Amino acid sequence: MGLYTTDEIIDALFKAWSFQSSSKWSKDNPANGQCGVTALVVHDLLGGKINKTVLPSGWHFYNVVNGTRIDFTSSQFSEEIFYRDVPSNREEAFQDTNEEQYRYLKERVLDDLNYMHEENRP
């Protein structure tokens, strides 16, 4: 795993998700539309693989790290997800976002994670 825990990453993501990281974002459902961009940022942080599964609304992207499925954006759905674990990649996940949204989210998440780590230094 990387420098950060999954708990730290999810905290940073929830703080960073906004209309700037997905046009589908809302206060009531902050994870909405964030799957592609989030999978890319998590891939940058933790490595592993990007997988996808088909849902009624289209493809849903998430990560697999050390053989464990990590889906930070599953809260956007009210129905249960039946994962198909279809192998995907960064190029496909990028089709769900754009460079500006990706840069924004990565920058905000890294800023928050680095701030958390600086605060915890002795």
Image: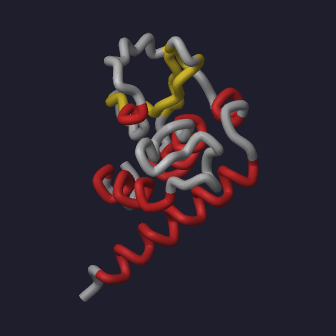
Colour setting: secondary structure
Tell me the residue at 32%/83% (across/down). 119
Image height of 11 relative to 98, above or below: below
Q: Position of residue 54 (x, y in %)?
A: 53, 13
Q: How many marks?
A: 0
Q: In the image, 101: left or right of 70?
A: right
Residue 23 sits in quarter: top right
Q: Position of residue 2 (x, y in %)?
A: 40, 54
Tell me the residue at 52%/12% (across/down). 56
Tell me the residue at 56%/18% (across/down). 57
Tell me the residue at 29%/84% (across/down). 121
Outermost residue toward the bottom in this view: 122
Q: Decide which of 95, 1 is in the foreground and name it.
A: 95
Q: Position of residue 74 (x, y in %)?
A: 39, 32
Image height of 108 relative to 91, above or below: below
Q: Quadrant of the C terminus?
A: bottom left
Q: In the image, 104: left or right of 3?
A: right
Q: Decide which of 100, 63 is in the foreground and name it.
A: 100
Q: Decide which of 50, 106 is in the foreground and name it.
A: 106
Q: Position of residue 29 (x, y in %)?
A: 43, 42
Outermost residue toward the left in this view: 122
